[in-house]
Amino acid sequence: MTLLLLLAVALIGVVTIFEDTATQTPAPVGNVAGIPQRMLEAYNRAVAAMSTLSPDCRGLDWTLLAALAQVESTQAQGHQIAADGLITPPIIGPILDGHGAGGNTTPVYDTDGGRWDGNSTYDAAVGALQFLPSTFAGLAAKVRPEGGANPNNIDDEAMAAALYLCGNGRDLTDPGQLFAAIYQYNASTAYVDEVLKWRQQFQTLGAGGTDVPASERAQRVIDAARSQIGVPYSWGGGDEQGKSTGVCCSEGGQDGRLVVGFDCSGLMLYAFAQVGVHLPRLASDQAGVGTRIPASAGVGALQPGDMVFFAPDGSRSDSAIYHVGLYIGGGQMIAAPKPGDHVKQQAVWSYNYAGGARVL
C-alpha cells in the first residue's frame, strides 16, 4: 500500500520498535523461514542496485523489503514465483471504490486503464509489495529502462520498493527517516510498527546457515512425525504410542475428548519415542531437554531433528513457551498448529520464535 492508498491497517498490540539499523543484516546464505528463495534473491538484487540508482541512500537491506512484503502479501503466499520473477496468479488488492469497508472510504480512480488491476474505473494495489499502478508507473523507467516493468514481477517490484524507500537519498539508519520511508507506504503508525516488528524478526532469523544432513536417528524421528501429516489437531491429544483423544478444553473451546489426534507436544512425544527418547508432556518442559539453541542464533543454527519453540513476543522465559514443532531442514518444520487444523509441514514461524533444543 502506498501513501496514496488510504486503507487503514487493522493491527493490535504492537509497540513501535526502532532497532539499531546502523549495522545492516548481511544477505542470507541459506533459507529464511517463510520467505521463498526467489523473493530473497529479488530483495538482495534491489538492495545492490541502489549503489547505482540511489547512491546517497543509506541503511537499506533485504530485511526491510522482506518486512514490507510480509505485511502486504505474506511473501506472495499462495502464488507461484517463476524463475524470471513473475508471480502468478497476479496479486491484486481490493478495488478502491470508496465503498467504506476496511477503511476504503476515498475512491482512487483508474490510472492504468485496468492494465494491472483489471478495473478501468478504479485502481487497486498490485503485486507482492502492493503498489498502486500510478506509483509504480512513476518508478518504472528506473526499474527497467528498456521498458516492460511489471508490478507482478518480484524483481521489478522489489526494485521499485527500494527506490521508493530510498527517496532522494534517505538515511534509513536514522529512526525518523526510517519511519517516514515506511509511513509513505501507508499513513498509519500501526502499520509502521508492524513492518518494523517483522524487520526485527527477519534480522534475528536471517543469519542464514546451511542445513547439515539429518543423522540416522533424526531421520527416524522426522519420518515418524511426517507419517502423521493430516491427522487432526486434538487439544491434549497424542502420546508415545500415537494419536489419541485429548482433554477439555482449548482457549478456542475445542474439546479434545471428542477428537483423535495430536497437539503440538503430543506429536513430539510420539516422534521421539520412536528412537527411545522420552520427553515431558508440555512444550515448555520439552524446551529444557537436551541443548538449548537460543533464538538469537537464528533458524540457521538449527539442524534436522531439533525441536523448535515459540513464545509470546519478547518473552525470555521457557515457561512462556506455547508451541513446539520438529525442524526438518530448509526452514521447514512439522507441527500440529492449532485446534481445527491438522499435522502439517510448514515454514518455521518468523513471529514469536523462541529458539530450539537439540535432543539427538
Image (cartoon, grey):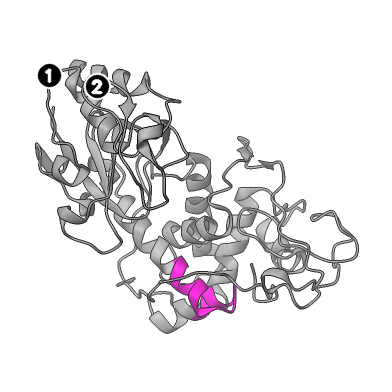
- In the image, what residue occupies the spot 78% across and 62% down? 95
Q: Is residue 103 left or right of residue 315?
A: right
Q: Residues within 10 Å of mark 1 (few under 14, many from 20)?
A: few
How far across and down, in percent of the image, does residue 115 sit? 85, 54
- Per the rendered image, the range of residues in magenta is 180-195
Location of residue 174 (image quadrant): bottom left
Task: Kindly identify which residue carries mark 1.
Answer: 276
Task: Kindly identify which residue carries mark 2.
Answer: 221
- In the image, what residue occupies the spot 90% across and 65% down? 121
Location of residue 103 (image quadrant): bottom right
User: Mark 2 is on which residue type?
Assistant: Val
Give the SS element for disc 1: loop
Image vertical order of residue 268 relative to residue 59, above or below: above
Instruction: Report, in whole angstroms, how far the alpha carbon at label 2 lies from the one at label 1.
Output: 10 Å
How far across and down, in percent of the image, does residue 43 sit? 50, 53
How far across and down, in percent of the image, does residue 20 sit? 30, 72
- In the image, what residue occupies the spot 48% across and 47% down? 40
Q: Can I make out residue 162 in this image? A: yes
Of labels 2 and 1, the one closer to you = 1
Image quadrant where one finds the N terminus: bottom right
Magenta segment: does it hold 192? Answer: yes
Image vertical order of residue 234 relative to residue 32, above or below: above
Q: Can I make out residue 331 in this image? A: no
User: Mark 1 is on which residue type?
Assistant: Gly
Q: Is residue 221 left or right of residue 185?
A: left
Give the SS element for disc 2: helix
Q: Is residue 335 left or right of residue 98?
A: left
